[in-house]
């Protein structure tokens, strides 16, 4: 557990009980790893102050927070609204970049990722359209942000997909499958840029409805449609 790349630990005590040479605490420990992913655990410790004055941990209980069932399963209306919100967010990032520049667009993109994706719960299964090689899959928030707005030396091939002048997004679902508090969709996303050029991609999303009722993308696969046209024949040798 200690080898998982932790870079920051924050402790939020709910209460501390002192009794003679012992003390018991209960609260949350919030851990951040080197990729910026956050893990929150419920934590109870009991400490003993020994004869030499050293504090010793005598009891240590740790568990993941209890997540109650969602008050209701996801509805198709919620799925469609989440998809529409993704499209509006893409256009908002593009227009912010055009009108206010990269810093403002990057800030907005980070806020959108935090609100729309589920990186705070763990890896997101994100395979972007224009990603390849060792950086094909963007399972961390940093990788997702780099894909959408670039500006990250660790992702040198990312020029910022969300910065390409998008002005309209249309979503055409082939099917929507709902199971409890998750929903998976498959279909096309059709994007139009400020010059009227249209890009169509095959898209699969999985949404998770969290304990607060927020819709989170936990899986996102995007690819260009398959073109069955035969490759041109090679030119004859001179």
Image (cartoon, rainbow, N blue to C red):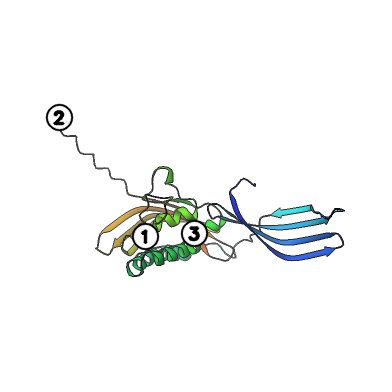
Residue 162 badge: 1
If the image is split into quadrants, where does the C terminus sit?
top left
- Decide which of 55, 171 is in the foreground and name it: 55
- Decide which of 122, 210 is in the foreground and name it: 122
Residue 137 badge: none
The reply, left or right, for residue 191 in relation to residue 31 is left
Q: Mark 3 points at which residue?
A: 117
x, y percentage for residue 83?
42, 62
Q: Looking at the image, is mark 3 or mark 1 nearer the viewer? A: 1
Q: Is residue 99 above or below residue 222?
A: below
- Decide which of 229, 8 is in the foreground and name it: 8
Q: Which residue is drawn at 47% across and 61% down?
A: 113
Q: Residue at x 82, y 64 (%)?
A: 18
| Residue 100 can be seen in this image | yes
Q: In this view, does 214 lie above or below 222?
A: below
Q: Looking at the image, is mark 3 or mark 2 nearer the viewer? A: 2
Marks 3 and 2, Cα distance to the nearest angstrom?
53 Å
Q: Is mark 2 on a helix, strand or loop?
A: loop
Category of crowding for the residue at label 2, using alpha-carbon neighbours closer than 10 angstroms: few (below 14), some (14–19), many (at least 20)? few
Residue 237 badge: 2
- Decide which of 44, 182 is in the foreground and name it: 44
Category of crowding for the residue at label 1, using alpha-carbon neighbours closer than 10 angstroms: few (below 14), some (14–19), many (at least 20)? many
């Amino acid at each position: 557990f200690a080898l998982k790349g932790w870079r920051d630990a924050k402790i939020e005590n709910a209460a501390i009980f002192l009794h003679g040479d012992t003390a018991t605490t209960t609260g949350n420990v919030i851990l951040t790893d080197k990729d910026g992913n956050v893990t929150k655990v419920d934590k109870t410790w009991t400490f003993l102050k020994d004869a030499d004055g050293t504090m010793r941990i005598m009891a240590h209980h740790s568990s993941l927070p209890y997540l109650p069932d969602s008050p209701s399963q996801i509805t198709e209306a919620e799925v469609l609204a989440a998809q529409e919100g993704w499209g509006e967010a893409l256009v908002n990032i593009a227009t912010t970049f055009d009108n206010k520049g990269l810093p403002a667009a990057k800030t907005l993109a980070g806020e959108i990722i935090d609100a729309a994706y589920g990186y705070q719960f763990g890896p997101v299964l994100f395979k972007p359209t224009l990603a390849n090689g060792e950086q094909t899959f963007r399972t961390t928030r940093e990788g997702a942000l780099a894909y959408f707005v670039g500006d990250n030396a660790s992702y040198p091939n990312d020029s910022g997909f969300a910065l390409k002048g998008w002005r309209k997004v249309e979503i055409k679902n082939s099917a929507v499958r709902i199971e409890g508090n998750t929903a998976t969709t498959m279909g096309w996303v059709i994007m139009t840029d400020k010059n009227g050029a249209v890009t169509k991609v095959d898209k699969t999303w999985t949404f998770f409805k969290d304990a607060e009722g927020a819709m989170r993308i936990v899986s996102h696969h995007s690819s260009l449609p398959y073109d069955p046209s035969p490759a041109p024949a090679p030119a004859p040798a001179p």
